[in-house]
Image (cartoon, coloured by chain):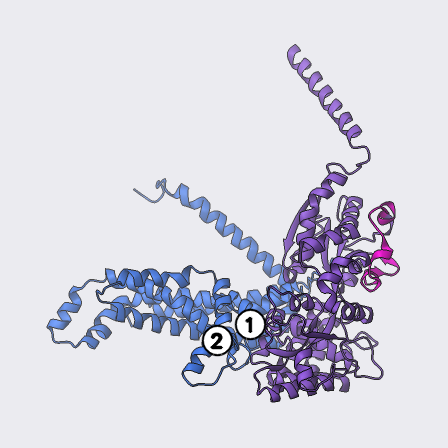
Chain colours: A blue, B purple
Amino acid sequence: MTQRSDPSRLFYQPIVAVLTVTSLVLTVYVVWLSLRDLSLMRAGRDTFVGFDNYIRFFQDSRGLWALWRTVLFTVLATSIEVLLGLAIVLFLDRHFFLKRLVRTLLLVPIIMTPVVVGLTWRFIFDPATGMANYVLSRLGFSAMDWLGSPQVAFYSVLIADIWQWTPFVILLSMAALDSAPQDPMDAARVDGAREWQVTWYVLLPMLRRAIAIVALIRAIDSIKAFDLFYIMTRGGPALSTETLNYYGYVLAFTNFEISYSMTVALILTVFTNFALLAMYGVLFPKSGERP
Amino acid sequence: MFSRRVFMVTTTAAAVLTAIAGQAFAQGKPFDGVQLSVLMEGHPTTDAIQKLLPEFKELTGIDVALEVVPEQDITAKMLLELSSKSGRYDVVQNNIIYIPGFVKNGYIVPLDENLAKHKEQFDQADFVKGYFDTNVVDGKIYGVPVYGESTFVMYRKDLFEQHGLSEPKTFDDIANAAKTISEKTNKEIVGITMRGQQGIQGVYVWAAYLWGFGGSFLDANGKSALATPEGIASLDAFTKVLKDYGPVGVANFGWEENRLLFQQGKAAITLDATVNGAYNEDPAASSVVGKVGYAPVPMQSKSPKGGSSSLAVHSLYVTADSQNQEAATLFSAWATAKEQQLKSMASDPNSGVTSLTALNGEEFTKRYGAFKDAMIAAINQGNPQYLPTIDQANEVINNTGIAVSKALAGTTTAAEALKEADEVNNAAIGR
């Protein structure tokens, strides 16, 4: 059957068309808004200001710092989650009693809504009554100010994010591992490879694509991370946990500066797209099997 | 054909008859069948009003669709509707700090005329004057107060007595008492706890220090003037007492954390909203019932620019795009009338009543007698400009909150943090 006469396209083409039009219209509207100075507290007094909002962003140290924190959070969260997840998967890659139970339990953090996760970790990190400091005190360490110290708060949120999303990496990698053929590894063992060599040279390359996709999904989610910051720290203390996404929220919903907020959102989008395209290029090279 | 004509005639007649009957029925209920859409904050008073809505329907025939949204999200939600002139809400509830901006933008309308038509539901003299007057702009009434609160100092009478301390009258007294109790109990009891979280939380409490030291948010020209000697001294005092004698983690303390610590008896002093009194005196949840003394917020300055206790009032406003402004005004008046306020105290924990009858009633004294006098004194001294009430109020508070947070975290000095805040505030005010 040639592509022209394929009747199944009648099913997907309308949807593709609707999605395309919607995203195009929204994007154009956002761009248009970002070129004006619309504020909800200055009703009917918005004017066309050209690229003023963009110039303002690159002179706005609060915004640039927020961008830096977004980058830091994305890089740290993604890499730690992928590495930790992989380590756990390799560790779990054997048949053992309760394997099914472990898998089911791994789903719990993923299913929990981020708001609940944020609240739970907020209680755990409570300086006076939280479990984290209780454990520290039992181990003989002094209490930490998990969410009240600008040097620590960012990493406390990171811990919550890692707790929630490492299981996601584990689940997807586990599925990939289960469907990977056993023969190449057996062949390698017959050839006299040691276990770590089998893992490093045979197993991991087979999992590469699955890992790359997991990393990509996690990176996209980390850039957009909002709930945990909103619940746990509200961007504080001393702005130490304000990411660009959260700054955009403050601009729109606290300061009511719709246009500038849209500009920030747009800059984040463009930035994200470039970063992900670069990442995609590295993870999925076009020519050849693998780098 | 013929049968169709008969059908049309009979149905038209029936419709006309129903309409006439309906008219006759609605005598004395001119708004029978009117639908109002109301947006209110999640708060005990809202819960109480919700329970009373069937009575309003019976009285006036008006159907009220009540939408309840958390306080922190409500402004953005209503602004989206108000600025697009959608007419989605007839009545909205918000803090009085937004009134000047709303009036300037033509989002809300004066209520004088419609209130005068419904004297049976509206008794201006029954409202706490301090609460009511915040709703008046250029001599016109723009809102009716649903609930209000002020701030005061709460301290543990038992601990103060034990350590030979007397009621704190100045900020130095507070620091001194916090030091004594913290040291004498070997930090077992936290000397003082206050909200330190970045944003409105920290600003709401620090503003007591700001005004008390003789500072203010804005100067005479409406420009942000925080980095004055008074402002810097106030932020230094606030952060010092919290850093030295405050709880671990105070930099992320919101209203909830602060209230819980004090309620559990783990702190000797706190400065917070008067509504906290109701929580301290609640035997079901508090271990400090009857042990708490209530004192006014200190005034250290000899020439203050304004009072150091807050005056936070949340009122109902009628929107300019409402199709039923008279019915909407009637609802606002009814919801805040003394009868409803009296009933609300019985059904929900509400120490923020705005009606004098409710405030001076038996129920209030029975529940909140421990702090009633201190609360009324605080309201009477309450500063309506406690938080800035300009269009950019939210942005100014947000920026100031960052300065307070930075100083508290020690990442910059108070002077530098406030200077930065002034710069961004003035940029916002100038926009």
Q: Is B135 one of the magenta-colored residues?
A: yes
Identify which residue, B137 or B351, lies in the foreground.
B351
Q: Amino acid at mark 1?
A: Thr
In contact (CB < 8 Å): disc 1 and disc 2: yes
Which residue is drawn at the image coordinates 56% and 53% (left, top)?
A: A25
What is the residue that sits farthest to the left in this orientation? A190
Using the image, determine if residue B325 lies above or below residue A139. above
Q: Amino acid at mark 2?
A: Ser
Q: Which mark is residue A156?
A: 2
Using the image, determine if residue A80 lies above or below residue A40. below
Q: Earlier in the sequence, mark 1 or mark 2?
A: 2
> Quadrant where the N terminus of chain B lies?
top right
The residue identified by callout 1 is: A233
What is the residue that sits farthest to the top in this orientation? B2
Q: Quadrant of the rendered structure where residue B30 is?
A: top right
Which residue is drawn at the image coordinates 36% and 71% (left, top)?
A: A82
Q: Is B339 one of the magenta-colored residues?
A: no
Identify which residue, B288 or A246, lies in the foreground.
B288
In this rendering, position of residue A52 left or right of residue A110: right
Span colored in magenta: B114-140
CA neighbours of label 2 inside 10 A, class few (<14), some (14 to 19), many (20+): many
